[in-house]
Image (cartoon, rainbow, N blue to C red):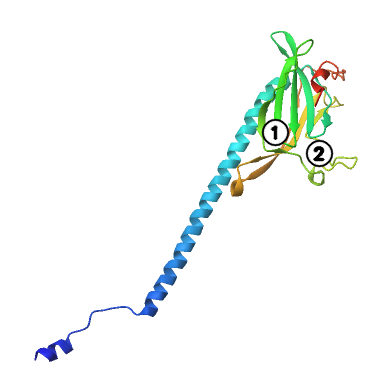
Amino acid sequence: MSRRHDRDRPRDAGITMIEMVVSMSVMSVLMVLVTTAIVQVYRTYNKVEATNLAQSQVNTVFLRLDKEIRYASGITAALNSGPSSVIEYHIMVDNVKNCVQLRIRTDTRTLQRRSWVAQGGAVPTTWTTLLTGVGLVPAVSATPVPTGGATAAPPMTRLLPSGDQSYQRLRLYFTTTGGGGAASTTRLTDVTFTALNTFGNPDTNLICNTGRVGL
């Protein structure tokens, strides 16, 4: 009786090796999909964060430059020498005319600034970096397309008064790259500042030419 009872009792439920392999395969696929989705979300977030941070830095710098250039009394013609592109403008500080010099260096990919008293003031040897990750706009994608066989558009240009514009203007035209690796993002910067205290086309290159020595 005892043996017959043991024979009639159902055995413990179990799984086969094939079922286990299939289950593990399905779980592996699901884990890969979930991990890929999480990584993609983080990459997108980092890229957006890098873009916003880079744009915020650009906006902060340009607000400062707009405030200065708006009341400038003159803008010099741009000088392109080696890895440097340089331009100056004149502002009043405590009723004293000062030269402000902007420089873009393609080797260090920076936008830099320095200033000194226009007449008789010592030109500082150090520069303040305003932006990093600055690059030139290739000629093939520039507007307008540069002439003379140039491979890139000039990053800084003085615009003289024209028929519909009575003031000198300063155009900054370059790219800025923020973030690193997969989060790296590059944006085009094209902004024109108007110097409201400039009239006509005065020769403004001589007053600040001491700052161009050794560039």
Label whose residue precedes the other's in the sequence (1 or 2): 1
Q: Residue at x 81, y 35 (%)?
A: 154
Q: Secondary structure at mark 2?
A: loop
Q: Residue 45, percent across and down? A: 53, 46
Say which quarter of the image contains residue 81: top right
Above or below, 89 relative to 146: above
Q: Secondary structure at mark 1?
A: strand
Question: Which numbered disc, 1 or 2, marks the residue closer to the eye?
Answer: 1
Q: CA distance from mark 1 to mark 2?
A: 16 Å
Left or right for 197, reference 149: left
Q: Residue 109, percent across and down? A: 71, 36
**Disc ID at residue 176:** none
The three-letter code of the residue at mark 2 reads Ala
Q: Residue 70, percent across and down? A: 72, 21
Left or right for 157, reference 70: right
Q: Residue at x 10, y 89 (%)?
A: 2
Q: Residue 130, percent across and down? A: 66, 29
- Could you classify mark 1 by the number of other residues whose Cα lies within 10 Å: few (under 14), some (14-19), or many (20 or more)? many
**Disc ID at residue 110:** 1
Say which quarter of the image contains residue 156: top right
Quadrant holding the C terminus: top right
Say which quarter of the image contains residue 171: top right
Quadrant holding the N terminus: bottom left
Which residue is most to the top?
A: 95
Above or below, 65 relative to 45: above
Q: Which residue is mark 2?
A: 153
Between 32 and 70, the one nearer to me in the picture: 32
Between 101 and 56, the one nearer to me in the picture: 101
Above or below, 103 relative to 143: above
